Image: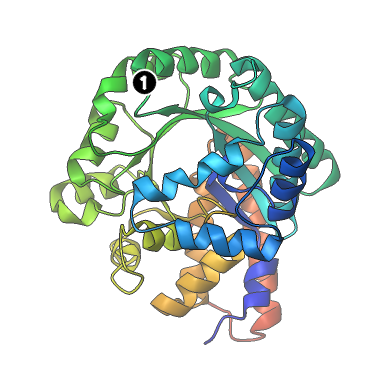
Amino acid sequence: MRIARELIRRLPKAELHVHLDGSLRPETLLELAAGEGLRLPFGTPEEARAYMRAHAAPDLARYLETFELTLQVLQTREELSRAAFELAEDAARENVWYLEVRFSPILHGRRGLSWGDAVEAVTAGLRAAEERFVIRTGTILCGIRSISPEHSLELARLAISLKGRGVAGFDLAGAEKGNPAKDHRAAFYEIRNHNVSSTVHAGEDFGPPSIHQALHYCGAHRIGHGTRLCEDGALMAYVNDHRIPLEMCLTSNVQTGAATLLGHPFRLYFDSGLRVTLNTDNRLVSDTTLTDEYDLACRTFLLDVYDLRRLLIHGFKSAFLPYEDKAHLLRGAVEAMDRLFEEHFPGGYQRLRSFL
């Protein structure tokens, strides 16, 4: 049975992997740039989307270069708060019930903004959105692979100090080639010893050894992307056995050359029982929404409603939330899902609810 895009939009969703600096509204990017007298290589929102799409290829390094444009206008408290608020608003309008927004304060200090102030600004924007929309949020602070491991350690300590006050976890982002995660293991040692959740970008533009380091040197609780995990069967089994979620981003992976769409291992992972989640990665740079990503997965990999239900549940189960909060959110989401599925497929939605 075909799953209508409108149903996907209405279903409750969790998004665990989205970068603030890659998810500005094009209108906001243009407005902020104009206010600061910055010249951009495009002049309309449509041109902005087209430019980003064209330059988000052919590999991860080139993809990351596009962020220089958005970072130029994310250097003040006001800019960061606005971007965070608008991202949460956009997510809420497509029924994302839970959103984890990641960013690196390291990249937002060009005009003297402290790392702590940057986090406070993003948290304030997200909290303002929570007060106006039906959404819960958290931030994930990112160390950068190509920047000093000492900075990652300092950032890890900042994340620890703000645990439970808006910060949900810690991440390591950036180009994998030539920048091994194990160089940053001191930061993750600190994170683990203070009981903070962590994720690591791995297996996107480098193979299974990158994922191995993320898990066994850094102790990651989730893996960002994990596209090349299938190249190591034993490691894939380990990830499956230990229920380590994969934060998959289909459109982004195709743009960076990590996989072709039809050759993407998503279906293999899903059918093998891995805890796969779907995410946008970067809403502006990849010109996508979470509804787009689920719709793409359903059409490409021929998912039925029961596949979709399980995939949605994976997202909520993998959230960096306290157990009781997560269980409560998941119960509400499942009840809402089942009502919507029954509404769209009256009398035909009778399978046992065996995924919890």
Query: Quick one: 234 or 125, which is closer to the camera?
Result: 125
Compared with 170, 275 (above or below) is: below
Residue 165 visible somewhere in the drawing: no
Q: How crowded is mark 1: few (under 14 residues within 10 Å), some or many (20 or more)?
A: many
Compared with 104, 268 (above or below) is: below
* Residue in the image at 59% along x and 22% along y: 110
Give the SS element for disc 1.
Answer: helix
Q: How far from the left and from the top, in percent, is residue 102? A: 55, 36
* Residue in the image at 56% along x and 46% along y: 22
**Across the whole image, how many numbered discs are drawn on residues?**
1
Q: Quadrant of residue 122?
A: top right
Say which residue label 1 marks. 188
* Residue in the image at 72% along x and 49% along y: 30
Compared with 294, 134 (above or below) is: above
Q: How far from the left and from the top, in percent, is residue 141? A: 52, 28
Q: How far from the left and from the top, in percent, is residue 309? A: 53, 66
* Residue in the image at 30% along x and 42% along y: 242
